[in-house]
Amino acid sequence: MPNSWAGYLAQRPRRVDFRRYHPGFRAGTLRRVREGITPAEALSCVLDETCVLGSEVVASRDAQGRILAEPVLSTRRLPPADNSAMDGYAVRRADLAAATPPRGVDLRVAFEVVAGGASDAVLSSGSAARIFTGAPLPPGADAVVRQEDALRDGDTVRIFVAPALRENVRNAGEDVEPGERVIEPGTRLGPAHLGFLASLGRSVVAVHQRPRVAVLSGGDELVEPDGDVAGGRIVSSNSYSIAAQCRELGADSVYLGIARDTPEDVERHLRAGLGSDVLVSSAGVSVGDRDYVRGALEKLGCRLLFWGVHMKPGYPLAFGRVEGEAGPLVFGLPGNPVSAMMTFEQFVRPALRKMAGFTALHRPLLRARLVEDLAKKAGRLNFVRVALERDGETWLARSTGSQSSGVLRSMILAQGILVFPAEATRLAAGDEVTVQVVDESVLARESPGF
């Protein structure tokens, strides 16, 4: 057997059944393409082939939603010194032991300390210092009295409470000490993280790169949204849905356009996406006479790993990767709009999250009570689009209506995806079911809970 890709292509048999074999090599042997596998097997295969992307340094203010690629260690003590948590008066507790609301104790206002300033003055017995939130506590003081609990008259302040030790004082280092490991790699950076990075003086931070996704549609029947739909042409909506799914999880997408139904045009468009991390096509990965994507991918050096997943919608899913350094993962999605979105949801999305550095790769799950009967044939796992609502502490799930793979409106209405097990043929109203939450706004509430 020849030991090179080109040599094998030159000598391959003319009647290879490409639905079952792919002329690629691994460890010098012909690799069989898996066909008609379970969703769990397909997902495992995809994630096994998916690597976490490297890191890049970005401005901390632009790191919202990115995944941290380095441990963050504190180089500072926060707060750097004991400071006031309130606007008020720094005092010595011993001077206020007799203070009560009706009478109070008078103290001389010796000096003032502002935030960002410093004072070398020592607070002496019988004195108070006017102090503002964030200002360092002067030596000699051991508490701060709120200005609401005091009445000032010129250089004298009458205080009506006896404070506890260190009351209204933020202790130096109570947030973090130098050398502490404060944010772990793999953390999704949110507003609090960015504020903390700023407080540590970190204007830049290392995060995992965003996956780059090339999106291709294909078919002579497709036109752009402003194109002429006469004569049975249809709008290439899949490219818009898929690109939006990429953006939703923070991936960068580039649109490769619409490939026409010729092997040459399909290959030309696919070749343009080889520099991406992931190439997603909704252009003909089935076995029809005009489905050229698989042949073009083969020519470009793609090692196909599986074709066909026992799920509905979305059986004709292909997955592989282009051989060679940094070759992209390749997903051939079905052409029907719901099938394309659903296969992206179940397989492409977890892969992109893994690439971006996420450790939790999948949608939130909840258990819900089904409010209607559902039926199907045994053999395929079904993903049923459902609307969700609350009944007290119980979630209710209801089908969005027609589950046809061409009814894109069902995805608009869906707040969750009900997992209908492969071998089950019936789910009855009242059954408890597992639902993937795709619209997390359903968790929002009118009441704040307090």
Image (cartoon, rainbow, N blue to C red):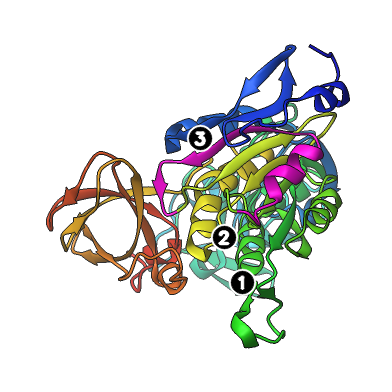
Residue 34: image x %, image y %? 53, 29
Residue 137: image x %, image y %? 69, 48
Report which residue position mark 1 lands on: 237
Of the two numbered discs 2 and 3 on the same chain, state the one appearing first in sequence. Answer: 3
Q: Is residue 72 left or right of residue 41?
A: right
Secondary element at image label 1: helix
Query: Which image quadrant for residue 390?
Result: bottom left
Q: Is residue 304 left or right of residue 120?
A: left
Looking at the rendered structure, the kind of residue marked 1 is Ser
Residue at 83%, 45% (x, y): give it: 274
Report which residue position mark 2 lands on: 335
Q: Can I make out residue 145 in this image?
A: yes
Looking at the rendered structure, the kind of residue marked 3 is Ala
Q: Is residue 56 left or right of residue 71?
A: right
Secondary element at image label 2: loop
Residues 286 and 197: in front is 286
Residue at 67%, 31% (x, y): give it: 15
Residue 321: image x %, image y %? 71, 35
Residue 276: image x %, image y %? 80, 46
Report which residue position mark 3 lands on: 42
Q: Which residues are magenta?
A: 289-313
Residues 163 and 26: in front is 26
Mark 3 and mark 1: Cα distance apart in space: 25 Å
Position above or below: 89 against 323 = below
Residue at 49%, 44% (x, y): give it: 362
The C terminus lies in quadrant: bottom left
The N terminus lies in quadrant: top right
Q: Is residue 446 left or right of residue 107?
A: left
